[in-house]
Image (cartoon, rainbow, N blue to C red):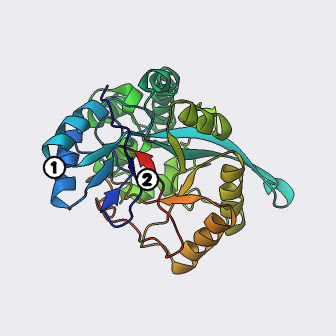
Amino acid sequence: MPIFMSTTFSSAAVKTDLHSHSTFSDGTYTPTQLLNLAKEAGIKVFALTDHDTLTGIAEAQTAAKCHDIQLISGVEISCEHILTGGYGKNKAKQKVIHVLGLGFTDFTQMNATLSKIQTSRANRGYAIVEKLAKITQLPVAELWASVLTKAEGNAKAVGRAHIAKVLYERGIVKTMQQAFDKYLADNKPAYVAIESLSMADTIELIHACGGKAVLAHPTRYQLSATRVRKLIADFAQMGGDACELPSADEPISTRKMVDRSVAEHGLAVSTGSDFHGTTMPWRRLGDVPKLAESQRLITLSL
């Protein structure tokens, strides 16, 4: 695994993208290709944050050195959290939440824990395909083979974006987003939860490995504004370090709501494009929101 220097980074003046995905999870570009694109975009500080795996970091580090880009060690971990509050049947809601681990140095401990989640990810991907096969009347083996092709044969890397791409290419849905809206999103007919750590345990793991914990895209979990604020509050109370800011294409009112919650709970902020490549062309590498005057970018080890 790459060794990162013990200097720190916190300047918002340097072009930074702290959230991206490669072919080692559900992105469409290799780590080397990602760093080539980062160079073209003028990015100086970059984090590869594949889902539940560190496999691409070594390749990313080699490419980053060629382009004089500072690479932050990163991962996006799927975890579970029960949100309380609300009324009636919605009083408590269990959600899969994504937490970014950034700047960690203990790869051994991180890998040991993530390997269990990776096995769960493979099992989950197949379970989703089984459900879709029944819905679409297509053979399970045929669908699974197509999904594995998208994941370059790595069952542990299978994500819902791979499955959505297959549904789109087969004409089952008109867009990738429709695949999520109709079949793959939480509580939809083909949804299967991933076995994962609790949010509290995820934060603890990241800290134990020497990193900082960032709540990823807090407004993308299909939660009401009240529950988004509750999620940010819970994350802060559990010792989380920062909150990722909403993308610039989200409503101004959403950004202001997140800004208020971040300030209320004393969190730092993080900025990232959540770039996946050609499967989600509306997310562009290096296209990250600007910080408000009072906000501080998370301080990370390089």
Furthest residue toward right: 88
Secondary element at image label 1: helix
- Which residue does the numbered mark 1 point to in the structure image? 36
Pick whichever of labels 2 and 1 is earlier in the sequence: 1
Q: Is residue 51 above or below residue 215?
A: above
Residue 100 circle label: none
Residue at 13 percent across and 42 percent down: it is 66
In the rendered image, the quadrant that contains the N terminus is top left
Residue at 33 percent across and 26 percent down: it is 154
Furthest residue toward bottom: 252
Residue 111 in percent (x, y) is at: 45, 24
Other residues around mark 2 within 10 Å, as few (<14) / some (14–19) / many (≥20): many
Question: What residue type is disc 1 on?
Answer: Asn
Instruction: Judge left or right: residue 117 versus residue 272.
Output: right
Residue 137 quadrant: top left
- Which residue does the numbered mark 2 point to in the structure image? 179
Residue at 27 percent across and 52 percent down: it is 277
Q: Nearer the viewer, residue 106 or 131?
A: 106
Residue 78 in percent (x, y) is at: 54, 39
Instruction: Say whether residue 209 is visible.
Output: yes
Q: Nearer the viewer, residue 298 or 283?
A: 298
